[in-house]
Amino acid sequence: MKKLIYLIVIVSFIDMFSQLPIMSPFAQSLGATHVLIGSIIGMYSLSNMIGNMLSGYFIDKIGPKTVLVIGLSITGLIVSFYVFVSTPGQLLVVRFFHGLSAGFLVPAAFTLLSFISKSDQQGKSMALSGAAVGISAILGPAFGGIVASSFGINFVFIPISITMVLMALLVSVYLTRTPTSDSGDESLHLAEAIKLIKTPVLFVGYVGAFSLMFAQGVLAYMLPLKVEDLGYGSHFSGLLLSTFGIVAIMIFMLPTNRIFDRYSHTKMLVVGLVIIAISLTGLSFTSKLELLFIVMTCYGIGFAILFPSLTTLMIKNSSKAARGKVFGLFYAFFSLGVVAGSSITGLLSVDYNEGFVIGGAALLINTLFISYLIRKYTFTKSLNHTNQ
């Protein structure tokens, strides 16, 4: 059952990553202006964040399996609509609904994984799920770019659409039904979301999730610009990003993944953030290609430490009845971080080296804030409060 869930995570993230290299030229080919192209790209993350938050309510109400079946089916259908898009306005609408429906998938998958994993192996399970994300980050852009250039852009959307519908069938047949919330209040309230965010231990995880994806947003925006300006060729941007993904996957899948069940998740969280912050800053002072690969290796180590620590922290400090809402908010902060990382550095109109320094400094500030919260609050009390 776990292998099927990991496969769902891979397919869900490939759906997103495969469109990174093709969406801008696709929008441009339809006659979109630069402003509209930016809106089309950002629309997915915006609506995805809404989907993440809504998913928590439905996961706890009808169960993660049902959410996955419906979400995969609807997302597969919506992806097929890209084939019929002929104007920038139509593309913007499809992007909105694509991001909204896809926002239900990952929280449901991680909630389901947390239900079926043994309590003493949650860290390892989250590490393996992180490996699934890393595999998607490597395969997705390559699939999108190569298939679009070789066979046309429609051949990117059609296989993904079919795969998602097939995954929905597999989930409906092979996954067992999981528990739903037994709480009396089934309504979705903003006050309930605020209550979860204000829970100290969960708030630490949400700030950590935002920080991780803020770094990813800065990296995705600035690294290709630096590599191109240094004259190394655009293909090295992909190789550098693949380096961090490969390093992370190795740590996730090798026996090193045992460290996530052996050491404090809060301490690992801080260590991972510090490594990523130093790596981002290091990119600003590095111009030699071999040094860039070394820095990206360090970045991969930081990512590999941080991601499972965050997700395990969410599981260890939430009740099953609220698990869906907790993960829904968690991935909403993920989406918010990506948007903030790329848009803030873009609005500041800084060059790539300044962008890396700003990103590293922002992460260090967040790390200090998280360290302060960890020392200030007793997380055992926070857990008891969450489970009530």
Image (cartoon, rainbow, N blue to C red):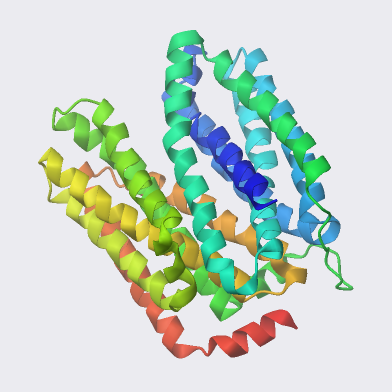
Instruction: Give the vertical position of 306 relative to 19 (above or below).
Output: below
The residue furthest top is 151
One can see residue 21 in this view: no
Asked whether, in this view, residue 178 is left or right of residue 213, the answer is right
Asked if residue 36 lies left or right of residue 104, the reply is: left
Residue 349 placement, left or right of 28: left
Residue at screen point 81% across, 59% down: 178
Kindly give the residue lying farthest to the front in the view shown: 255
Q: Position of residue 384 (x, y in %)?
A: 67, 87
Indicate the quadrant containing the C terminus: top left, top right, bottom left or bottom right. bottom right
Tally of numbered discs: 0
Residue 259, by quadrant, is: bottom left
Residue 128, above or below 326: above
Residue 324: percent from left, percent from top: 71, 61
Q: Residue at x 50, y 88 (%)?
A: 377
Q: Residue at x 49, y 18 (%)?
A: 26
The quarter holding residue 363 reads: bottom left
Q: Quadrant of residue 257?
A: bottom left
| Camera sees residue 367 | yes
Query: Percent x, y for residue 147?
Result: 48, 17
Outermost residue toward the left in this view: 288
Question: At x 38% / y 79%, what residue is drawn?
Answer: 371
Relative to 153, residue 193 above or below? below
From the top left corner, tell me how far across and down residue 266 is, in percent.
45, 76
